[in-house]
Amino acid sequence: MDRFLIEGGRRLSGRVKVAGAKNAVLPILAASLLANKGRTIIRNVPNIADITWMLKVLENLGVKVERSIPERVVTIDAQSLSSYIAPYELVRKMRASFLVMGPLLARMGRAQVSLPGGCVLGPRPINLHLEGFKLLGANIEEEHGYVSAQAERLQGRVIVFDRPTHTGTENLLMAASLARGKTRIINAATDPEVVDLACFLNKMGARITGAGTDMVEVEGVSNLKATDYSPIGDRLEAGTYLMAGAITGGKVTVDGAKANHLRIVLHKLEGMGVAIEEGDGWITAQGPPRLSPVEILTYPYPGFPTDLQPSIMALAAVASGTSHIRETIFQERFSQVMELIRLGADIRVSGNEATVFGTEKLEGASLMCSDIRAGASLVLAALKAEGRTEILRVYHIDRGYEGMEEKLESLGAKIERVNSSG
């Protein structure tokens, strides 16, 4: 297992380019299964572990996949789709692989997908997905850790979510694209990645309107064609590097992300004393000598993203006062807390709320990643901490960040990746 060695206390400065949004590329790869002819080309594909696992899922389904990592291009020929079973040994690697359920059901009339794995963030039920499939006319059975669905052809209906669900909205969008008649999704997720998937599907020939609002309509079509598409930049990666500049008192410019996708994050950073500038496709963050405390409530988009909650907690740990962070999305998203405390942070957790008493300095220690975003927060804290920090199990970070150590090094960080024997 690789680990990071970080010498903290250096101000970061310079420019860094983000890759395509992981949470847009993964559903787009799943949606490529819907094309019954032609070769779909996806550009700006990040070289991260979760993409590799999703491509293995597609290949296991009989799909022909070609990948050029240097060019960040993936070509998919789904005409050869031959299997409707997504096995446990692949799906357990990440939750997003459950997104093949909708396309398989719509295209093949049946799907058998293992219950999903991924980061351990507490209960993340797929019941909203399944209830939606049932409303579209699918027969659903759960047995031996698999979900099986079958329908000769799905029929458009009105689907009402109790709460917005990112992947649930995406799965139902894909399934409804080939359903008979009109589907209306009420209380749909409005995330930029959901909008990007809808744009991709429309380019394939789907008829989706209202993406980006809480009511989306899908007029089913008989077939979809392959296309050529470039997904949006990764707002979560962008937010992480902007916070890296902020926590070190440096000045970092991120290219390839849209400020409108990070509006509440930028607002909170400005409240902490960070100077923000933005332009067409770029954002700059300049950190103050000492950050101010912050109040955070995670909430579905356009609220503060749960995926950036661990990172902003790292900033709060060295702020000049007391910060309060309330997590409303996942029950177990404070796994970074004990590791930050090992660096000298003063954090108290009660249920889904954390109180962070800012301290003037952190000191290097040996830490362990538990998931993608918790890992990113440990890196940010290590960049600020005095002395050397060792971060173990960075394979979690590799699931969501392409070449993090190389990008940080280009900004002036002293960070090294070493293997378990190094």
Image (spheres, rainbow, N blue to C red):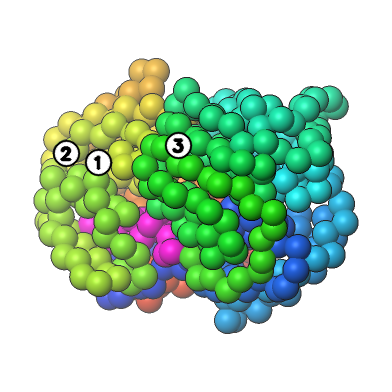
SS class, disc 1: helix
Give the main secondary structure of the magenta stretch: helix
Is 133 in front, or is 3?
A: 133
Mark 3 or mark 1, which has the lower sequence index?
3
Kindly indicate the quadrant of the structure image that contains residue 135.
top right
Q: Which residue is mark 3?
A: 188
Q: Disc 2 residue type? A: Pro
Q: Tell me the crowding category of disc 2: few under 14, some 14 to 19, or many 20 or more residues within 10 angstroms, Cα based.
A: many
Q: Residue at x 39, y 18 (%)?
A: 351
First to last magenta residue range = 232-246
The residue at the far front in this view is 181
The location of residue 20, given as percent across then percent down, is 48, 65
- Can residue 127 be seen from the camera position used here? yes
Q: Which residue is mark 2?
A: 293
Q: CA distance from mark 1 to mark 2?
A: 6 Å
- Residue 354 lies left or right of residue 143; in this view the side is left
Q: Disc 1 residue type? A: Ala
Is 31 in front, or is 291?
A: 31
The residue at the far top in this view is 351
Kindly indicate the quadrant of the structure image that contains residue 163.
top left
- Residue 203 lies left or right of residue 408; in this view the side is right
Q: CA distance from mark 3 to mark 2?
A: 33 Å
